[in-house]
Amino acid sequence: MKKNHVVMITALLLVLVFITGGYLYKSQQAQTQAELARQNHELLIKPYSPRTGSPDAKVTIVEFMDPACETCRAFYPLVKKLLVEHQGKVNHVIRYAPLHHGSDYILQILEASRKMGTYWPVLDLMFASQPHWTSHHQAQPEVLWKYLEHYKFDVVRLKQEMNDPTIVKNIAQDLADAKQLGVSKTPSYFVNGTPLAIFGYDELRALIDSEIAKNY
């Protein structure tokens, strides 16, 4: 009986050590990313970065996203909702972190659409149709092209524009900046330069609310 108690206590201690170790590791990660953001603040936003929301807003959400990322797809409408709720006070800057295989090609299509003035509709369609053009976390562009053609986007011009060297250069720059800022997963959010330490919608909302309270 006493031996069983010893085994049980040892198991509980091991679980406690594991949980504590995980918490400390995540805490250290958060501190490291916060320091990287502080040291490399100028890397958060580029002049070419897509932006939505009020240009005069005092609170800026910078999001590093990957179009093939399921969580990015899930959070996309949630961030749009937050912009509506805090209209005039918050804007949203999109940066790219193509961490999935083939995502850089998808981003070239998206950036080509920006040159054509259809960036947001194409991004909406990309996320809406994402389950169909991704397989095992890999992008399948040929399927996306079919969706774009079905919804009457100018596929011929998109294929021409997407090879612009500036587009390729900017996507590569975004990925380099993401790595410099310690971004290892998508989506990753920074609100007025502060990284989202614990990932979650409630946590993102709380960070935004905190920055609004500071600035308004």
Image (cartoon, rainbow, N blue to C red):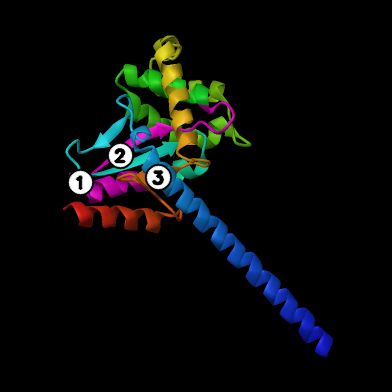
Name which residue lies at 72% across and 81% down: 9
Please give the range of residues in magenta: 75-103
Badge 3 or badge 1: first in the primary sequence: 1
Seen in the image, is 120 located left or right of residue 55? right
> Is the residue under label 2 in contact with that under label 1 (CB below 8 Å)?
no
* 59 is within the stretch colored magenta: no
Q: For this rendering, which residue is in front, 45 or 24?
A: 24
Label 2 amino acid?
His
Mark 2 lies on residue:
92
Q: Secondary structure at mark 1?
A: loop
How many circles with numbers are drawn on the protein?
Answer: 3
Is residue 154 something one can see in this rendering? yes
Q: For this rendering, which residue is in front, 191 or 157?
A: 191
Mark 1 lies on residue:
87
Where does the image place residue 205, in percent across and percent down from the top left? 33, 55
Distance from Cα at disc 2 to Cα at disc 3: 10 Å
Furthest residue toward bottom: 1
Q: Secondary structure at mark 2?
A: strand
Distance from Cα at disc 1 to Cα at disc 2: 11 Å
* Front of the two marks 1 and 2: 2
**With respect to residue 59, does 170 lie above or below?**
above
Q: Which mark is residue 189?
A: 3
Label 3 amino acid?
Tyr
